[in-house]
Image (tube, grey):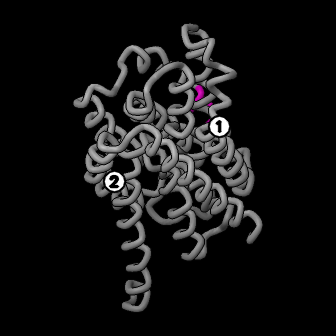
Amino acid sequence: MDWATLVGYWPFVFGLMATGVVSGIAAGLLGIGGGAIIVPALSNALLLLGYDADVVQHVAVGTSLAIIIPTGIMSARSHYKRGALDLKVLRLWAPFIVAGTFIGGLMAGLFSGDVLRIVFAVMAFVIAANIIFAFQTRLMGHLKGSAATHRASGFVVGYISALMGIGGGSLTVPTLVAFGATMHAAVGTSAGIGVAIAVAGTAGFLISGWGATGLPPLSLGYINLVALVLIAVLAAAFAPLGAAVAHRLDQKTLKYVFAVFLVLVGFNMLWKVLAG
């Protein structure tokens, strides 16, 4: 590799490092695993390096799920120490989350990159609207004592999370709030649920991307190892900082921060579809 090529990679490396720091803080602050930041950031970085748009979105989603594993563990530990992780809910959701996520990861290879971007954007808008207007609470609040509803919710959250490349917090948090959890408990528990989503989703994307053409160097299926290492180390290190900040904010502030963040990410994804 010549000097000019090496120098050209440094913006990519620094971009991934910055993504790691910001996504780690977001993981702890919002219980989202950082995927809503990692997916658009990694997608943009790979597009700038000249990789095919369809492959880029799949790699960004798959790698994001792999990165969320250590980030989610660090975030979940921090929330558990503060008593904000409900182990009963976690055990109820986990098997169905894993099943939905694994199936979603396997099926992701059947969809184009633009389809995955549109899914991401639409769900981001729906979730943000739900946080502000709380329509999910009105629709599902009366079902909070139903174990079957919890299990069905887990499967749906897992499947959609796999297609979006997120840890599920943006879906899990409002669902748990609708079922009666406080915002802090919902954020903490969603961090633990995000670990199960990340493990199952990573396995699905590794399998569905095995043998795919046009992948970036050092990729296993749709998982890029360079991005995985660079982002994961910094994200895991900064997740406790986000968790500490979350417990200093009141619940109303946390909700609005969450909603604005999702709207911005949704517009970013739609812009990519329209620009392509």
Horizontally, residue 228 falls left or right of residue 98, namely left
Circle 2 packing at 10 Å, graded few (<14), some (14-19), many (20+), is many
Q: Quadrant of residue 70?
A: top left
Whole-percent x, y for residue 109 in the image: 67, 46
Q: Of the residues under marks 2 and 1, which one precedes in the sequence?
A: 1
Of tags 2 and 1, the one toward the viewer is 1
Whole-percent x, y for residue 38 in the image: 48, 56
- Label 1: which residue? 133
- Label 2: which residue? 235
Look at the numbered disc 2 and give the secondary structure of its residue: helix
- Mark-to-mark CA distance, 2 and 1: 31 Å
Compared with 220, 14 (above or below) is: below
Horizontally, residue 79 falls left or right of residue 102, namely left
Question: In the rendered image, which quarter contains the N terminus?
Answer: bottom left
Question: In the rendered image, which quarter contains the C terminus?
Answer: bottom right
Residue at the limit of the structure toward the left, as seen here: 81
Query: Residue 142 versus residue 191: which sits nearer the camera?
Result: 142
What kind of residue is marked 2? Ala
The residue range painted magenta reads 100-104
Look at the numbered disc 1 and give the secondary structure of its residue: helix
Give the residue drawn at x 59%, y 48%: 209
Whether the magenta-drawn stretch holds residue 103 is answered as yes
Q: How many marks?
A: 2
Whether the magenta-drawn stretch holds residue 153 is answered as no
What kind of residue is marked 1? Phe
Residue 17 appears anywhere in the view: yes
Whole-percent x, y for residue 147 in the image: 55, 9
